[in-house]
C-alpha cells in the first residue's frame, strides 16, 4: 500500500516536553509527511488557554479537554483514519477514549497505538472500561511482543509495530573518537517507576572500582531533590550531573559520549532510551522487566539484571567497563539488531495496518 495521499489524524502528545511517546508522535508525523501523507496533528497536551489556568488543578483538565474534543470532531470530517498514541492511566480515559468514540461516531477507522509501560497493572484495574473502548477501535497496535501478550490475555488481538529510531541522529561516535573519562548515563525521568535510586547506588559501587567514572542523569521529575540528597549521602555528588531533560539532538550527543547506559526501571515496555543507546554504539545494562528482554538479548546486545539490585547492576557495568573486547561485541550486535527499528522497516508495518482498516471502513460505510 502506498501512503501517499492518505489523510491521517495523529492523536497524541507532542514536545515540549521531550519524552518517549511525545518524541515518537512527532517523529512518526514527520516521517509520514515525508512520504506524502497529510497529517492532522491533534495534540493531547496543547498549551492551556488562558495560560494561568494551568496552575489550577481540576479545572485545567476541563480547559484542555473541551477544545481537544472539538478538534477531534472537526478533524474527523477531513481524514481517512485516526492514529491514536495511547498511554495508561488518566491519559487513556481523558484522551484515547474520546478519540476512539468520536472516530466511531463519525465513521472513521481508529487505530489505537498503545504504548504504556504500565499496561499490565492498568488493565488489571480498568480492563472493563479499556476493553469496551478498544472493541470500538478498528485495530490495536503495540510496540512489543510483551504488550501483545498482555492484551492477548484480555482477549484482544494486536499487531506488533515497533518504535522508530532515527539512526541518522542516533549514531555511533566517529572512529577514533576519544570518549574521555568513563561516562555512565541514565536517560529516564526522575520518577519512582524508573528507580533512579538503584542506579545511584550501583554507580557508587562502580565508582569504588573505577574512580575516574562519572554519571550523568538526563531527565526531570518530582524526585530530583531526593535523588540529589541520596547522591550526597552516597559520596558521589561531585561526580554525578543531573542535567535535566534534553532535546533529541543533545541526547544523541550524550549517548555518543557514553561508555555504558543504565536502564534501572521497575516497569517498562519498549524504552526509546535503550534503543537510542544501542543505535549510538553505547553498551546497555538494563533491568529485565516488562518488554526489555524482547529488545535486549542478555550477553549478546546488552546485559540484563534483576530490578532493584544495585550490586548486580554495578557488576554488569564494571564488566563492560573493564572488558573492552566484550563491550565491542555488545556494540556490534546491538547496532545490527537496531536496524529493525528504522523507518524503512517500520513504515511497511504501518502501511499494512492502515491497509487492513481502510477497506473494512469502506465496507461498513456501504452497509450502513
Image (cartoon, rainbow, N blue to C red):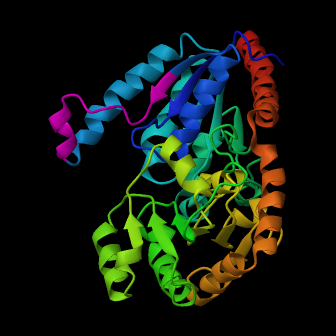
Locate the N terminus and report the quarter of the image it occupies.
Answer: top right
Q: Residue at x 45, y 65 (%)?
A: 217
User: Is any atom of residue 108 visible in this view?
Assistant: no
Residue 237, image quadrant: bottom left
- Queried whether the magenta region covers residue 58, the answer comes back as no
Locate the C terminus and report the quarter of the image it occupies.
Answer: top right
Q: Position of residue 162 (x, y in %)?
A: 73, 45
Q: Residue at x 56, y 35 (%)?
A: 25
Closest to the observer: 368 or 240?
240
User: Is any atom of residue 343 visible in this view?
Assistant: yes
> As drawn, is 329 to the left or to the right of 155?
right
> As drawn, is 351 to the left or to the right of 276?
right
Q: Residue at x 78, y 58 (%)?
A: 334
Closest to the observer: 46 or 302?
302
Magenta span? 41-56
Closest to the observer: 156 or 179?
179
Q: Position of residue 105 (x, y in %)?
A: 55, 22
Q: Position of residue 242 (x, y in %)?
A: 38, 64
Q: Position of residue 131 (x, y in %)?
A: 62, 48
Total marks shown come to 0
Residue 274, image quadrant: bottom right
Amino acid at each position: 500500500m502506498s501512503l501517499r495521499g492518505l489523510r491521517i489524524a495523529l492523536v497524541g502528545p507532542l514536545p515540549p516536553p521531550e519524552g518517549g511517546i511525545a518524541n515518537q508522535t512527532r517523529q512518526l508525523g514527520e516521517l509520514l509527511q515525508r512520504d506524502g501523507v497529510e497529517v492532522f496533528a491533534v495534540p493531547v497536551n496543547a498549551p492551556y488557554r488562558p495560560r494561568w489556568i494551568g496552575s489550577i488543578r481540576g479545572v485545567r483538565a476541563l480547559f484542555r479537554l473541551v477544545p481537544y474534543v472539538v478538534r477531534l470532531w472537526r478533524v474527523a470530517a477531513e481524514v481517512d483514519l485516526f492514529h491514536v498514541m495511547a498511554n495508561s492511566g488518566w491519559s487513556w480515559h481523558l484522551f484515547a477514549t474520546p478519540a476512539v468514540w468520536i472516530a466511531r461516531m463519525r465513521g472513521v477507522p481508529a487505530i489505537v497505538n498503545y504504548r504504556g509501560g504500565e499496561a499490565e497493572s492498568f488493565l488489571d484495574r480498568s480492563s472493563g472500561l479499556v476493553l469496551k473502548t478498544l472493541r470500538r477501535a478498528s485495530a490495536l497496535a503495540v510496540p512489543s511482543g510483551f504488550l501483545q501478550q498482555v492484551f492477548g490475555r484480555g482477549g484482544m488481538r494486536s499487531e506488533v509495530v515497533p518504535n522508530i529510531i532515527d539512526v541518522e541522529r542516533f549514531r555511533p561516535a566517529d572512529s577514533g573518537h576519544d570518549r574521555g573519562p568513563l561516562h555512565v548515563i541514565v536517560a529516564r525521568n526522575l520518577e519512582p517507576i524508573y528507580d533512579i535510586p538503584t542506579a545511584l547506588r550501583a554507580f557508587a559501587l562502580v565508582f569504588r572500582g573505577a574512580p575516574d567514572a562519572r554519571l550523568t542523569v538526563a531527565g526531570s521529575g518530582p524526585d530530583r531533590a531526593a535523588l540529589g540528597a541520596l547522591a550526597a549521602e552516597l559520596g558521589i555528588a561531585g561526580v554525578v550531573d543531573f542535567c535535566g531533560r534534553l532535546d533529541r539532538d543533545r541526547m544523541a550527543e550524550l549517548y555518543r559520549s557514553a561508555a555504558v547506559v543504565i536502564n534501572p526501571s521497575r516497569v517498562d515496555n519498549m524504552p526509546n532510551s535503550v534503543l537510542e543507546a544501542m543505535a549510538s554504539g553505547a553498551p546497555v545494562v538494563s533491568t529485565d522487566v516488562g518488554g526489555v528482554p524482547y529488545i535486549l538479548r542478555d550477553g549478546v546486545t546488552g546485559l540484563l539484571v534483576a530490578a532493584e539490585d544495585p550490586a548486580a547492576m554495578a557488576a554488569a557495568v564494571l564488566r563492560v567497563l573493564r572488558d573492552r573486547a566484550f563491550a565491542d561485541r555488545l556494540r556490534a550486535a546491538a547496532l545490527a539488531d537496531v536496524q529493525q527499528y528504522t523507518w524503512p522497516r517500520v513504515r511497511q508495518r504501518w502501511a499494512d495496518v492502515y491497509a487492513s482498516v481502510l477497506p473494512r471502513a469502506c465496507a461498513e460505510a456501504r452497509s450502513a
